[in-house]
Amino acid sequence: MPCTAIVRFAVSRAGVDRAEIVKHLQGSVPKFRGMPGLIRKYYLLSDDGKTSGGAYLWETRAAAEAYYTPAWRASMKARFGAEPTVEYFESPVIVDNAIGAVSIAAE
């Protein structure tokens, strides 16, 4: 079953402004293009620029969990000054208006 992971982290390093965060997010795009198990990723940034993260649609929860390792968490903490949170959700129904499709996961 597809899995949506919502990742959030505080941008707590002093002197990091919105433009720098967006530049960093854009710079990470190549590592997600063609990533096995990842269907789609939305980069997130709060209005005040103090919280960032992503909404990831994975083929399975196992694919998601394989990505969010302790090493990944440590890397995020080193870059942004705060450990991220990750929430997992089953995604049994997906409406994709961009391609005009609805996906319903088999149980």
Image: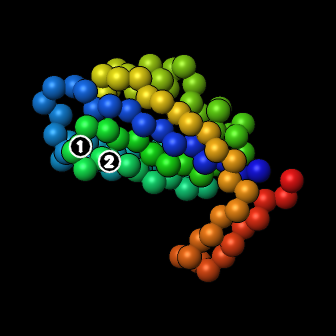
Q: In the image, residue 17 lies at what x, y percent?
A: 16, 40
Numbered disc 2: secondary structure: strand
Q: Neighbour class for label 2 at 10 Å: few (<14), some, many (≥20)?
A: many
Q: Is residue 36 left or right of residue 92?
A: left
Image position of 105 (left or right of 97) = right
- Residue identifier under label 2: 45
Element carrying mark 1: loop
Asked whether 47 or 96 is in front, the reply is 47
Number of disc labels: 2
* Callout 2–callout 1 Cβ contact below 8 Å: yes
Q: Quadrant of residue 69?
A: top right
Foreground pick, 38 / 86:
86
Task: Reply above or below: 75 against 43.
Answer: above
Please rate how many residues cluster around mark 1, counting C-alpha atoms within 10 Å: few if below 14, some from 14 to 19, many from 20: some
**Residue found at the very far bottom of the displayed protein:** 100
Kindly give the residue lying farthest to the right in the view shown.
107
For residue 85, say whether it is visible. yes
Disc 2/disc 1 C-alpha distance (Å): 6 Å
Residue type highlighted by circle 1: Gly
User: Which sits in the foreground, 21 or 48?
Assistant: 48
Which label sits on residue 59? none
Residue at image x 44%, y 28%?
84
Image x and y of residue 13, in percent = 22, 25
The image position of residue 43, as x and y in percent, is 40, 50
At horizontal 49% and vertical 26% (from top left) the residue drawn is: 72
Q: Residue at x 32, y 26 (%)?
A: 79
Q: Which residue is mark 1?
A: 49
Q: What is the three-letter code of the residue carrying label 2?
A: Leu
